[in-house]
Each structure stands twice: as structure tokens, then as C-alpha cells.
């Protein structure tokens, strides 16, 4: 399941030059806290103006917009399920996200690279451990 096209890095997603970045959006698509708010702030008022007429986006769906003032060309606003409690557990999120990314890379060989940008060293460590757990162990 290992794929060299999957890159894990520590950084600021609002500074990443890419075809698209994925925003963990809320259903209004109008910005909020955390990563969503940071992306809207860095993209400037054009992103909010483009999101307003899109209306609500239900969990499990996504909408794509331009990147506006971001170095990324597009923003994919993905709305996830609402977790009952404070935040979604990162260990669980890492396993799910990486499993799905690796499966998508297998299905779509034309994807050149998927970069997962983690904000903290702790988050990067969690994702690195999750990736190792998903990779097959070499046979002796």
C-alpha cells in the first residue's frame, strides 16, 4: 500500500503552492475557526464572495472554488461529519485519511502527488505512525 506519491510534511497549508488544497470546511462554507478560518483569511475576500452563492454543503460532500490570494489554484471545501465531543480524534482521522488517499492513488495513477500538510510536529508524528501501520511489512 506504500506509495512515494504520498508526502507528509509539517507546514502551513495557506502557503502551499499546489493545484488544489483541501479545506476542512463547515457546512456554510463561509469560514470559521481553525484551518477553515486560516484559509479564508489568507485567500482574501474573493473566496468568501465566491462561497456565498454556493449555499450550504452537507457533510460528505465538497465544493471547489478558486484559490484567490492563496498560492494554490483551487480550494476543495470538504465538509466532514460532526463529531460528538471536542474535535475528531487525530489518530482515527489519520488512519482514515491515509487509507483513502492511498486507495485513490492506486485507482488514479495520473495523480502526481498528494501532500498532507500538518501544522504541528505532534500531528506529523501521528500521521507518520499511521502511515507505517498501513504499509505492509517486508517479508523476510
Image: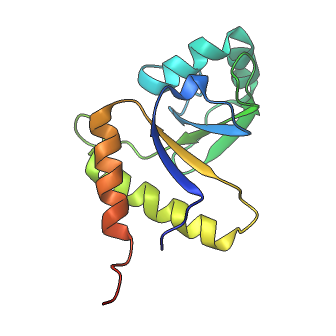
Rendering coords of residue 35 (x, y %): 47, 26
* Relative to 21, 82 lies left or right: left
- Above or below, 64 relative to 1: above
- Above or below, 91 relative to 10: below
Q: Residue at x 71, y 59 (%)?
A: 111
Rendering coords of residue 137 (x, y %): 33, 79
* Relative to 113, 23 lies left or right: left
Rendering coords of residue 87 (x, y %): 29, 36
Report the label total: 0
Quadrant containing the C terminus in the rendered view: bottom left
Is residue 83 among what the camera can see? no
Q: Nearer the viewer, residue 101 or 49?
A: 101
Q: Nearer the viewer, residue 29 or 70?
A: 70
Q: Residue at x 60, y 58 (%)?
A: 5
Q: Nearer the viewer, residue 117 or 55?
A: 117
* Relative to 52, 97 lies left or right: left
Rendering coords of residue 97 (x, y %): 45, 55
* Relative to 32, 67 lies left or right: right
User: Quadrant location of residue 76?
Assistant: top right
Q: Residue at x 60, y 65 (%)?
A: 104
Is residue 136 among what the camera can see? yes
- Above or below, 39 relative to 78: above
Residue at the limit of the structure toward the top, as seen here: 45
User: Quadrant location of residue 47?
Assistant: top right
Residue at the limit of the structure toward the left, as seen here: 85
Residue at the limit of the structure toward the bottom, as seen here: 140
Q: Residue at x 53, y 34 (%)?
A: 27
Amino acid at each position: 500500500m506504500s506509495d512515494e506519491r504520498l508526502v507528509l510534511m509539517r507546514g502551513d497549508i495557506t502557503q502551499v503552492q499546489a493545484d488544489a488544497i483541501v479545506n476542512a470546511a463547515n457546512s456554510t462554507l463561509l469560514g470559521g475557526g481553525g484551518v477553515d478560518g486560516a484559509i479564508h483569511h489568507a485567500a482574501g475576500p474573493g473566496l468568501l464572495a465566491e462561497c456565498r452563492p454556493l449555499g450550504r454543503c452537507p457533510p460528505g460532500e465538497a465544493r471547489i472554488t478558486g484559490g484567490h490570494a492563496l498560492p494554490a489554484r483551487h480550494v476543495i471545501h470538504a465538509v466532514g461529519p460532526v463529531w460528538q465531543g471536542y474535535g475528531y480524534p487525530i489518530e482515527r482521522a489519520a488512519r482514515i485519511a491515509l487509507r483513502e488517499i492511498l486507495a485513490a492513488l492506486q485507482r488514479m495513477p495520473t495523480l502526481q502527488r498528494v501532500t498532507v500538510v500538518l501544522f504541528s510536529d505532534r500531528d506529523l508524528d501521528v500521521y507518520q505512525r499511521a502511515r507505517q501501520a498501513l504499509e505492509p511489512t517486508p517479508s523476510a
